[in-house]
Image (cartoon, rainbow, N blue to C red):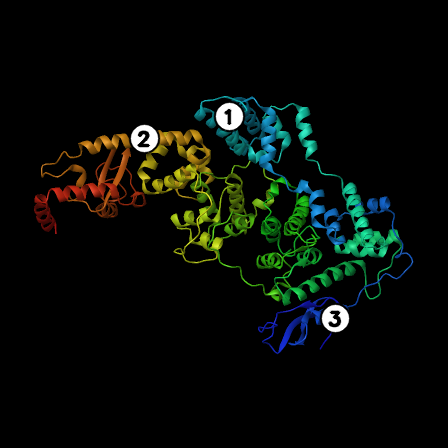
Amino acid sequence: MQNINPGTAVGTPSPTPPGPSSQTAVIRLRRLDQSLLRQGHTVLEFPAHQNCAQLLARELAKRKVHVFDTYAARRVPELESLCHLLCDLDRHSPMAMGIALGVPSQFLVQQFGYYDPDPVKRVKSLLAASLPLSLADVAARLQRKADSSGRPGCGTETIALQIRSLAACREIDRLDVQDLPVCDALVSMLLPLSAHVDWLGEVLGLPEDKVFQFQSDTVPPSRFQLSKTIIERDILLRREQNKPARTCGEWMKVMAMAGVTGGDLEQLARHWHLQVPPGISNWFRYQDNMAMAMEDELTLWHQLDHSQPVSLQHVVALLRLQHCALARSGDGDDSSWDRISFPLTVDNASNPRLFSKRQWHDVCLFSLLQCSAREGGDGQHISGRLLCRLVRFHLGNSSVEPVLQCPPPLEETQSRPLCPFDLLRLSQAGDEPERHALEMAAALGVGGEVVADRHWSEVWTKSGACTRRKALSTWQWIYTHAPWLETGHLVPLFRRFGREALMRELTGIAGSDFAFGEPASPFPERVVEFMDLAQDLCEKPGLVRIFGFQNQVTKHFGYAMLARCSQNWQVLNCLAVDPLMLQAWRNFVGAFQKNRENAVAKELEVNAGGYPHDYVCPITLTYMDDPVLIIQSQTSWNYFSRRNLIQALRDSGPFNPLTRCPLCEQDVPEVDQEHLKRINAWREQHPELEEEQEEQEVQEV
């Protein structure tokens, strides 16, 4: 058996897993050369009848440990001076330090709660403080913001239009606290401004002192205060365990684990008069070697049992979360996607627009702490299942990802509440994730995302993964505006509109005919209406075209949100984001349906041959078995045989054969089944006309 040298890492496991049936338990390791580069492999073989855990612990004990054995290293730093010294370090993160110290995650989550903001609660609080208010005044202030920005069509202008539409549709102007449905709708519209308390307070007409008070409530404690609180907690825990206070040498190890740079370690060493441990060339190498040793230890144990909990300290080392960038630091595009997606992978739905880049680094750490706190226990571990998820999404160190060989996720057939991790999966399903996300937002009645001001603007404009980012942003918008969503809601939605890739990504099942559990609650009435609308708009392109022309839909702010989608989805999005436009559509359809019913009552007027005009195709003057409705205006339309109409368009060009108005082949709807039933019923009642119809068809042939 070969020993594990310092910094060794686990390699690809044997195809035969350790267990009673195997003669030996095999673990493949990677060796390090003098420059700490991973090269070659080392294989450990354990007899099957021996305890692998004990043997691995024995091997790990043989690793070389860097010891600070000097008088300066054994000194205990004073608390206040230690806090000042640490806060002078550029990369010092109190949260990373707390994890390195082993402080329970429940305590850290409590101290860093400001990294878990609730934007809906923030907007509701500001709105409640401003009531009663005038919706017209709010829209006017937003419009002034848009005009001062110098950018036509920016988010604040869109929100102003939505608020005016809401006021006109509900026929109100002054909003009181009793108007709860209107308040909820207004909160939904103002959510894009939640990152800017000062803006939002000004828009709602709040006095400056109230806005200042709200801003004060969101200001986090200083790094000094947080560091002092965490160190005091560590001192208390060590006293309870009868351990002495940490020495300067131990603090060097802690800060190396916390991810400070080699330059910061040099600064600490100069202050405490410490020398680099024997065998290490400099403090940069010391920090790197420390992280790699913890990474290797984690992969070694995780290879034996993927279900066992793993230490937060080791996970942070494996993912290199001590630094502001994640492990995959290749090009800026991939690393920025990793930074955005990491909290979602561990079920934290925080929006990056609410934080600066530096704060987002701590949001990633905070999301891990939340998971550890939810899982209970000692508050210093996460589940092996969660680590496997991180590895599957390539958020770990790429050099050890093949080593872990995590099992694939299980297929799902039961409904459950939608979680942030689902948003990440849905945002990268299929070839056009952005289009799919936008169309599903419209079908759910949520509509496309309104963005008033973007943090991390470069994250949303780079090429490559830009489509995934926009899709993710839309799914987060859906998640915020439809908190009732379950997987049992999305599966039938995806089935109805043929989104196989989304369904496969959500459930892990490729087919579309599998049985899936029902959600705890049915679809809300608005969602049912919009799902039916989505199907109706697809089947009635003529009606959509007439409505769009009469209401200038192409100039509507909701139309451009779905620029890459077809016209029926663009119109549906306008209806979702504009209450007044939705009311106009309902009135338009109601008037059309009334005109059509009146026409149906008169359609039994027959032609010279005794056939109702709307039952025979105007092209061939024979009964239709595939009637389609071609609409020219709200009061004018014609029925054609779909087959004959498409052939006429191909032969004579894209024009209506009767009116010569423009008509493209893709605008021809599906067969009108309701009208086909009327035709068949008439034919059954008048069999005497069938013989004459057959003779005419023979003559045409």
Work out whether mark 2 precedes mark 3 in sequence or the reverse, and give the earlier one. Answer: 3
Number of the front mark, 2 or 1? 1
Does residue 155 sit above or below 271 in this rendering? above
Residue 442, image x, y percentages:
44, 40
Give how far across and how far down residue 397 sits, in percent.
65, 60
Question: Identity of the amino acid at label 1?
Answer: Asp
Q: Which residue is mark 1?
A: 179
Q: Callout 2: 10 Å neighbours few (<14), some, many (20+)?
A: few
Circle 3 Cα neighbour tier, 10 Å, few/some/many (<14 / 14–19 / ≥20):
few
Considering only vertical position in the picture, is 3 above or below 135?
Answer: below
- Name the residue beneath numbered marker 3: 58
Residue at x 90% of width, y 60% of height = 70
Neighbor class of circle 1 (other Cα within 10 Å; few <14, some 14-19, many 20+) is few
Mark 2 lies on residue: 590
Q: Is residue 646 above or below residue 608?
A: below
| Closest to the observer, 401 or 480 | 480
Q: Which mark is residue 363?
A: none
Q: Report whether 482 appears left or right of 90.
A: left
